[in-house]
Image: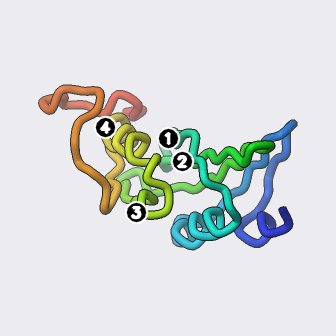
Amino acid sequence: MDWLKKIGKIYKKEGNDIYIKIDVNNLQSTIKTIKDNNIGHITAITGIDTKKEIEIIYHFWTGKQMINIKTAIDRNLPKIKTITKDFPGAMLYEMELAEMLGVQVEGAIKEHLLLAKESPIYPLRRD
């Protein structure tokens, strides 16, 4: 898996997990590279409000390893593009990011998954 070193900085290896940090501007090309290397399964998307930014981690299972792609977006203007073109299974995870952290996922379905439409808060924001 030498191609992983080309997509970003590997900042941690732990057991079968590989953690790579990328710039958000490289997200779409990174996702395409992952798909082109026959990684076909996204297992989750994790969002974390650090109070400085919102970190987003995309988790992919290869059958032997978990590849975790971490990026960050502006907390005050939380926007990111959908990855559902390459990984349709990301739809529910992106809906959860929108609902729980207020991330605007451009190109994603805009429906409520967990909260009532009238919910005034994003429960995972650290405000």
Q: Earlier in the sequence, mark 1 or mark 2?
A: 1
Q: What is the CA distance from the residue labelled 1 to the residue labelled 2? A: 6 Å
Please tell me whether mark 2 or mark 3 is closer to you in this view. 3
- The crowd level at tag 1 (other Cα within 10 Å; few <14, some 14-19, many 20+) is many
Rendered-image quadrant of the C terminus = top left
Query: Residue 101 appears at what percent x and percent y?
Result: 37, 39
- The crowd level at tag 3 (other Cα within 10 Å; few <14, some 14-19, many 20+) is some
- The crowd level at tag 4 (other Cα within 10 Å; few <14, some 14-19, many 20+) is many
Q: Earlier in the sequence, mark 4 or mark 3?
A: 3
Residue annotated with mark 4: 99
Q: Earlier in the sequence, mark 2 or mark 4?
A: 2
Please tell me whether mark 1 or mark 3 is closer to you in this view. 3
Q: Which quadrant holds residue 84?
A: bottom left
Tag of residue 55:
2
Residue annotated with mark 1: 47
Closest to the observer: 48 or 99? 99
Rendered-image quadrant of the N terminus = bottom right
- Does residue 50 show up? no
For mark 1, give the secondary structure. Answer: strand
For mark 3, give the secondary structure. Answer: strand
Q: What is the CA distance from the residue labelled 4 to the residue labelled 3? A: 15 Å
Query: What's the residue type where badge 1 is placed?
Result: Gly
Answer left or right for 26 relative to 15. left
Q: What is the CA distance from the residue labelled 2 to the residue labelled 4? A: 15 Å
Instruction: Give the residue displayed 49% in from the left and 41% down from the top.
Output: 47
Q: Are marks 1 and 2 in contact (CB under 8 Å)?
A: yes
Query: Residue 96 appears at what percent x and percent y?
Result: 37, 37
Query: What's the residue type where badge 2 is placed?
Result: Glu
Instruction: Give the residue displayed 40% in from the left and 59% down from the top.
Output: 82
Give the mark count.
Answer: 4
